[in-house]
Image (tube, rainbow, N blue to C red):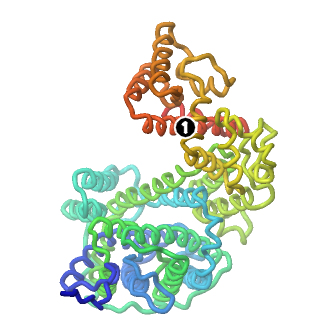
Amino acid sequence: MSVKPTTRKRVHPVDEVLPVPKLAAYGFQHVVAFYAGAVLVPIIIGSAIGLTNEQLIHLINADLFTCGIASIIQSVGFWKIGVRLPLLQGVTFAGVSPVIAIAMANGGGTEGLLYVYGAVIVAGLVTFFMAPYFSKLLRFFPPVVTGTVITIIGVALLPVAVNDAVTNPATHEQDPTNGRWMAYAIGTLLIIVLIQRFFKGFMATIAVLLGLVIGSAVAFVLGDMNFDGTSEASWVGFTQPFLFGVPKFSVIAIISMIVVMLIIAVETTGSVYATGEIVGKRIKKDDIAATLRADGVATVIGGTFNSFPYTAFSENVGLVRLTGVRSRWVVATAGGIMILLGLLPKTAAVVASIPPPVLGGAALALFATVAVVGIQTLSKVDFTDHRNLIIVATSLGLAMLVTIQPTVSEGVPDWLAMLFGSGIVLGAVSAIVLNVLFFHIGNRGQAVAGGPGKGITLDQVNEMSSEDFAATFGGLVQGTPWVVERAYQQRPFADAHGLREAFQEALLAGTTEEQIELINSYPDLGSEDATGTLNAADHVGLSNLEEDEHDNIVQLAAEYREHFGFPLVICARETERYDRVLANGWSRVENAPSAERSFAMIEIAKIANYRFDDLVADANPIAAARFGRINDFR
């Protein structure tokens, strides 16, 4: 009996339309995870630029309404707009400081917002038309730029959170000497920390929302929260386009917002790749373009309906991984729920009643988390390259100059006032420009060999003859030339990491005979140094042994060679204590020869890695000294 093949097309989990009850339940779950971060942005902006409570309610409603539209555009998609993945869109924290700066530079209040919305609309259009070409711009946004900017965003927003934390809920004036307001802020922060400590999964995801709810409840019980504005708010109200007036346009404001959108584009690109990995869909350049077109359209809609720039919310990307529900229609449903919430001024009025100190405590947690994400990104940066050090230090310093002393914008020409009006914009522009200056103009190669003042750059390495290449890097491995020869064939090297990887790949790709020949070129552990200072550095952990300890090492090396027929190779820079070296060696004596050959090659790769670091350190002595001190404490 033959089996009849099915003609039914299999639906990818991303495109699966779940039953309505499940769509509603999972969609509401996304809204709950998203809600706190979404409403914080309009509340913080509205409070900072002096909006009335009624205007703030409109801002919150507009935010939720347009977030819903943006999420549907991104997840459902049409034509070449929208990535069609479960990406929930929300107003980005990256825009908070620039929006406040633009508004305040143009009179604050609703008048200032008109210039904000003009800049938002133009920046959205630029993003839309730039989308197909953004992949070519990504090389200008390496981790040293994105990490610096994200760190600056988090750190620059902390003063905003601090100001709310010490604000009297009744008078809305700052009163840092009143411990009651600080208690609300720290209490809210503590609640968030405890929830994340003792709960996992979805509960940890909504820790900020729970912190806001519990903190507000305590403030209400103690008489520091009221719902006076709630009774006056309508139950249902539609968000009106250009509610505060026709947008106005300022060149400096537009440039500032375009910089913000470039930052958002990089952030969004990362979220798309992360989501694609989670849901099992390969991300192509066309997908990135479709995502950014949706961001552009959503941002234009945001400016039209009195809201701000959009990006994917990382909390909801994490929720997709947490729940395992990959359907984009769940996010579309969440978008529909947000649109409904955006039509309920009464709900927005309740949110607008959150006491500033409670809001400040939650904002401290969120903004500090953003800064930590930036630091995490910077951990991927090679700081032995002094250029990266200069980019981060200069950009962070300029950003903090404006953040700590915002009045410096009054001392510069009008055309520079907006740039100096926001630490985020100034820091971002600095990082982007310095990266171009150091890595894309003129002599772009990092010094990877040579002494101080005589550094050999990557550009020079890529132009070397095979003989010069061998003379420069031959000391990375012992004896046999085949490793260096094969690494040479992998030119051109894009950066120091690429050069390092070329040697690692060449090492591990050798034949069995080549690897045995290479292993045999290394001296026995504990023998007299046969290769000069390089080998002495490799065995730095064995440099101060007592006579009996040295004898034990020699005995270990002799038995190992007798057993395997090649020397015991250990990177003693990683295992600096004598007893650990001895224990490591004896544990390997009982290995199978094939396994031990692999272990030996790994140790040789580690030694080559350290020797490469030595070359870079010699060429960059100042940066190496700075970061060597840090490594000493690891």
Q: Amino acid at mark 1?
A: Lys
- For disc 1, the marked residue is 606
Q: Position of residue 47 (x, y in %)?
A: 43, 70
Q: Nearer the viewer, residue 501 or 254?
A: 501
Q: Quadrant of residue 279?
A: bottom left
| Residue 270 pos. (x, y %) | 49, 67
x and y, in percent, of residue 285 in the image: 55, 77
Give the residue at the far top of this rendering. 547
Q: Is residue 49 above or below residue 238?
A: above
- The quarter in which the N terminus is drawn is bottom left
Q: 622 or 595: nearer the eye?
A: 595
Residue visible at 22% across and 51% down in the picture: 198
* 418 over 164 or under it: above or below: below
Q: Residue at x 80, y 53 (%)?
A: 463
Task: Residue at 65% x, 33% y: name it.
Answer: 478
Looking at this rendering, what residue extends furthest in the front direction? Answer: 1
